[in-house]
Amino acid sequence: MTSQRKMSYHMSTICALCSLMLLLISCGTTWSGSSGPEKHLLIVTRTTAVSHNHFPSFNKQIDDLASVTHLYNVIQSLPPMHKGYACPADNGLQYQLAFSLPSVSEQQWTLAGSGCRQIRLNQSHSFLTTDEFWSLFAQTLGISESDLFPPPRSS
């Protein structure tokens, strides 16, 4: 191959690579491989199950893999909620927990902050919480335990 032909071949290769890079950039592909909105490992939102009680809003995203995984494992080890359990009065305080752990499929849990203080994935997966659980939950959120249980504001 002649020197001029080699030069032409290399220039064509460089142009093709540059075109490919521009195409990838224009399509929104990043070098980090990320796509779509960022997912958090745990999203916690305070809600109410009683329409006339309102609680201060609370939304928190946690991205510490070790603490979120530990909280998830503790939930899995809680005692199961049995039918016929007598519960104290329920003011409707709830937390919605959305887990997106790499080792587990995405899960939405409902955590009752009053009444039986149970945590429920669905009808067949419901667990009683413990004082130790609430302490860990507050620690994971970076708030005091008393901040987990604000009094309701009637409307």
Image (cartoon, helix red, strand yellow):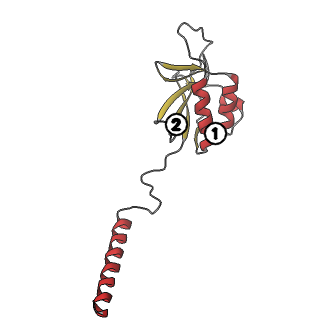
Q: Position of residue 155 (x, y in %)?
A: 56, 25
Image quadrant for the N terminus? bottom left
Percent from the top left, x then y, of residue 113? 61, 24
Residue drawn at point x = 59 percent, y = 37 percent? 69
Q: Is residue 12 above or below residue 138?
A: below
Mark 2 burial class by Cα count in 10 Å: few <14, some 14-19, many 20+: many
Residue 67's mark? 1
Give the x, y percent position of residue 22.
Answer: 36, 71
| Earlier residue among tags 1 and 2 | 1
Residue underneath mark 2: 99
- Residue drawn at x 67%, y 27% is 134
| Residue farthest front in this picture | 1
- Rounded to the nearest angstrom, the CA distance separating label 1 from label 2 is 12 Å
Q: Is residue 150 visible?
A: no
What amino acid is labelled 1 in the image?
Answer: Ser
Three-letter amino acid code of the residue under disc 2: Phe
Q: Position of residue 6 (x, y in %)?
A: 31, 87
Q: Secondary structure at mark 1?
A: helix
Q: Which mark is residue 124?
A: none
Q: Secondary structure at mark 2?
A: strand
